[in-house]
Image (tube, helix red, strand yellow):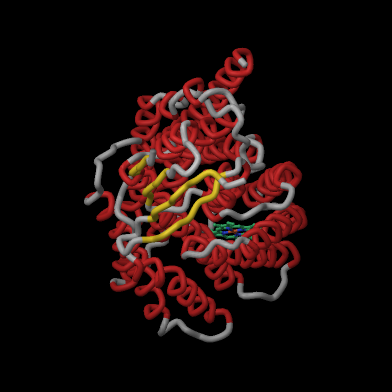
Amino acid sequence: MNTIIDGRDMQPPEPMERTLEALDTLGEGDEVLLLLYCQPHPLFSILRQNGYTWSEESRADGTREIRIRKQLG
Amino acid sequence: MHASLSFDQAPPISVPYRFFLVAPWFGVMAGILLAWSGSDAFVSRWTPEALALTHLIALGFMLQAMCGALFQFIPVAVGGNVWRPKLVANTVQPLLLLATLLLVAGFLFSRPGLLSAAVPFFLLALGGFVMVVALALWRTPATGMTLWAMRMAIGGLAVTVLLGSLLAEALAYGLAVPIVELTNVHLVWGLGGWALMLLAGVSYHVVPMFQLTKPYPLWFTRWFGPLLLLLLLAWSLRLFLDLSRWSMLVTLPLLAILSVYAGLTLWLQYTRRRKIHDATSLYFRVAMVSMLILAISGAAFVLWPALGADPRSVVWLGILAFAGVFVSAISGMMYKIVPFLNWLHLQRLGGPISAVPNMKKMIPAEAMTGQLRLHVLAVVLLLAAVWQPGLTRLAGLTLAASCAWLGWNLVGSVRRYQGFRDQIRAAA
Ligand code: HEM
């Protein structure tokens, strides 16, 4: 199951709270898509240390698409 | 449940808090000093009281808070690692405190020996701080204009401290340097190159994030910092050349870019996606309106020299900059950073997400907006006291009261953090 969290209209730390909640139920091959206007460094460091990978892309309007998955293996 | 998640080794919460918790009390000291000295303080910028007041705010309030914020902001916003944050903070913060008290006492009691005594402590504390921060800012793989603005700001701090130290030694030993010109250069680096540069860089990041505005336009973030730096360099040429006829060509563009930054920030707030009127947004609005008034009245003083000839006109600008712009913006930032850090560090304890209270529970909203109103009253009274000296004591007392309230709100938030932490630990 894929989850989309549009954090662009949320005040911190709501996007991070929602993402952490979504990660709790993330299955193999599932993806969380997080939309933000900034780079969430605190979240990245949590992901890095807990075996998640992510990719980032920016849209023309400054939105960043952050796709999070479980690291394979 | 995410009890298994581990959090990064960002600095312990005590690192920023030891700076934040002392900053407001320097504002209290400034207010009490003003109430005690009364109407003489604002006669000109060169009174011992005025010099002591500027540095109580610039070093005691602003620099303390900004150092604490940088320790936190560097890992969170630009993904940089500060070397041994706890050790550095535990050394820098008390040294800075001591140096500031010595410098302020030197100004207030006209004892140049104390000014000179403060210098080694400043060089040690801020030299170390600048090196550690610069290293973190140059080694991070992040990119973007917030990072560049922070790099320029830390350079601005270095220039300010060096010029301030030179001034202090010059006053103590009667060195043959142009004191007035040197002071003018020192103060624009302190207020512009350091404080404003940092505020702008941080704004690019936090205004959209916390106040839910559109991002600053790219043309602005690309040009503001470099242009500011260029204008500061041009302003500094006065040390070497006689620029009295040209100074308008630097001053007016400088005031113009201030108004663009302030106007743009107000416009972003006005057109934001979701209207929120928390203390942080309101404090930023107060800061930006003060900056606009500063730019407009500064331009008026330049264009109509008869207006600017009154020694009080510079005091008016100083109050707008210190109390109106920086104390406001920094108070607003602390009201956001402190609840956020409470939340982040409670998360780290590893309990379930539901165990961590909402950020809004960390400082009651009414306590923040009440304090903000008192601060605005203090700024208005301070400005009025420039032209109505009878109001000086009242203005000082109001400033002291509003800073004490700020300090109290922050202490309350730390207490709440400790309470929640103990609850979560007990439940685990
Ligand atoms: C980092 C932030 C700082 C800021 C924003 C700042 C700001 C200012 C301002 C606005 C003035 C002019 C005061 C007036 O005209 O009433 C001034 C003067 C002065 N500052 Fe600073 N300052 C800073 C740091 C320092 C430091 C670290 C020192 C000492 C090591 C220092 C020493 C002095 C001295 C000696 C004067 C000249 C006083 C005179 O000519 O009588 N400042 N500063």
The percent coordinates of residue B198 (x first, y second) are 50, 58
Q: In the picture, which quadrant includes the C terminus of chain B?
A: top right
Place residue B152 in its image quadrant: bottom right
In depth, the one of B208 and B335 nearer the eye is B208
- For image coordinates 30% across by 61% down, the residue present is A61
Place residue B216 in its image quadrant: bottom left
State ligand 1's quadrant.
Answer: bottom right
In the picture provided, is B85 more to the left or to the right than B374? right
- For image coordinates 52% across by 66% down, the residue present is B148
Counting the numbered discs, the total is 0
In the picture provided, is B281 more to the left or to the right than B52? left
The percent coordinates of residue B137 (x first, y second) are 61, 61
Residue B326 at least partly seen? yes
The percent coordinates of residue B369 (x first, y second) are 35, 31
- For image coordinates 46% across by 73% down, the residue present is B226
- For image coordinates 50% across by 24% down, the residue present is B356
The percent coordinates of residue B211 (x first, y second) are 34, 45
In depth, the one of B254 and B130 nearer the eye is B130
